[in-house]
Image (tube, helix red, strand yellow):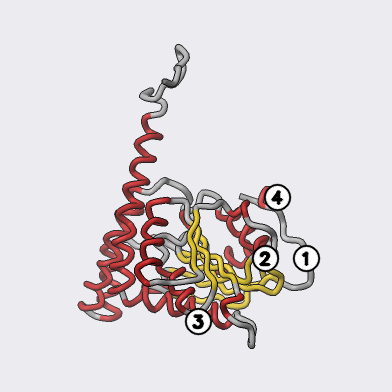
Amino acid sequence: MAHVRAGSAGPFSPVLLPTVLRAALDRCLAVAYGPVHDLIVERFTPYRALQREVLGFVEAGAPAGVYRRSLRVLDIGCGPGTFTAALAAAGFSALGIDRYTPVLDIARETRRARRLTHVSFSRLDMDAFADAEFDQVVSIHSLYTDPAPEVVLAQAARVLKPGGHAVFVNHVRRFPLVQTFRAARRTAGWVYALGALLWLIPNCVFELTRRPVGPHYWDETQLTERFSAVGLTVLQLRRTFLDGGSVLVWARKEADGRRTPRPGALRS
C-alpha cells in the first residue's frame, strides 16, 4: 500500500482531485469520440470530401514509379484511425499515433475488421522516432488542440525525409452551432444544414469539455511562418472543410540538407 507523508497531497487530496476528474473526463471523451467520429465520416459529406482531398495530396507527393508499400506515412493525432486506414487501403504503409489509448483500441479493431495490412497504431511519443524516418506526415484537425503545436511541427519536420511531404489541416476558428448551421443553410439548403449537425453538435460538446489549451487557430500567414521556421516549404494553402473553416497546408522538406530546428529552440 502506498505510504502518504503527512501534509502531502494524497490520492484524494483537493489538490489532485481536479486532475483526476480531468483525466477521467478526457478518457470518457476519447471512448465516446470513436463511434461518433465513424458516424460522422460515413455520413457527413464535408468530412468525406476532406479525407479524399488529403489523400489526393499524399498521392501527389508519392514519387513516380515507387512502390507505395515502400512509402511510410505517419498520421499524427490519428484518433480512431479512419484516415490511417484509408492510407493503407490506398497502398501506403501507414502508422497512426495518438495520445489516447481508447481511440487507438478502436483503430486496431477497425484494422482487424477490414483485414488491413501494412497499418499499425501506437501511443508512441514522436521523440521515439529517428530522424528522416518517414516519407510523408499528415495531421487532420489535431494540431489546434495540442498544448505545444510548434513542437509537433518541429518533430514532424525532423522525422520527415529530405524531399518528403507534409499535409496538415487545421481549424482557423471555432464553429458556433447556430451561426454555422445558418451559414450552411444559406449556402446549401436545409438538407445539407441538418446533415452538418452530425458534426456540429459533437464538436461543440468537445470544445466545451476538452482540456483548455490554445486555441491555436492559425490563419494562412501564421501557418506559413511556422512551417518555414521548422524547415518546411509551403507548396500550397487552401481553405477547406465546412464553410472554409479549416486551412489545408501542403509542404515539402527541402532536400538540400538544411538543419531542422530542435523543438526546444522554437518560439511557443
Q: Amino acid at mark 3?
A: Gly
Residue bearing mark 2: 228
Residue at screen point 57% across, 74% down: 250
Chain-order first, disc 3 or disc 4: 3
Chain-order first, disc 2 or disc 1: 2
Nearer mark to the viewer, of 2 and 1: 1
Nearer mark to the viewer, of 2 and 3: 3
Judge whether 188 appears above or below 99 on screen. below
Residue 252, percent from left and from top = 65, 73
Mark 3 Cα-neighbour bin, 10 Å: few <14, some 14–19, many ≥20 = few
Q: Are marks 3 and 4 in contact (CB under 8 Å)?
A: no
Residue bearing mark 3: 56
Nearer mark to the viewer, of 1 and 4: 1
Residue 233, percent from left and from top = 67, 71
Judge whether 115 appears above or below 215 on screen. below
Can you tell which quarter of the image residue 23 is in?
A: top left
Q: CA distance from mark 2 to mark 4?
A: 14 Å
Residue 18, percent from left and from top = 37, 33
Q: CA distance from mark 2 to mark 3?
A: 23 Å
Mark 2 Cα-neighbour bin, 10 Å: few <14, some 14–19, many ≥20 = some
- For the image, the number of numbered tags is 4
Q: What secondary structure is marked by label 2?
A: helix
Residue bearing mark 4: 265
Chain-order first, disc 3 or disc 1: 3
Q: Amino acid at mark 4?
A: Ala
Mark 4 Cα-neighbour bin, 10 Å: few <14, some 14–19, many ≥20 = few
Q: What secondary structure is marked by label 3?
A: helix
Q: Amino acid at mark 2?
A: Ser
Residue 258: mark: 1
Judge whether 103 appears above or below 139 on screen. above
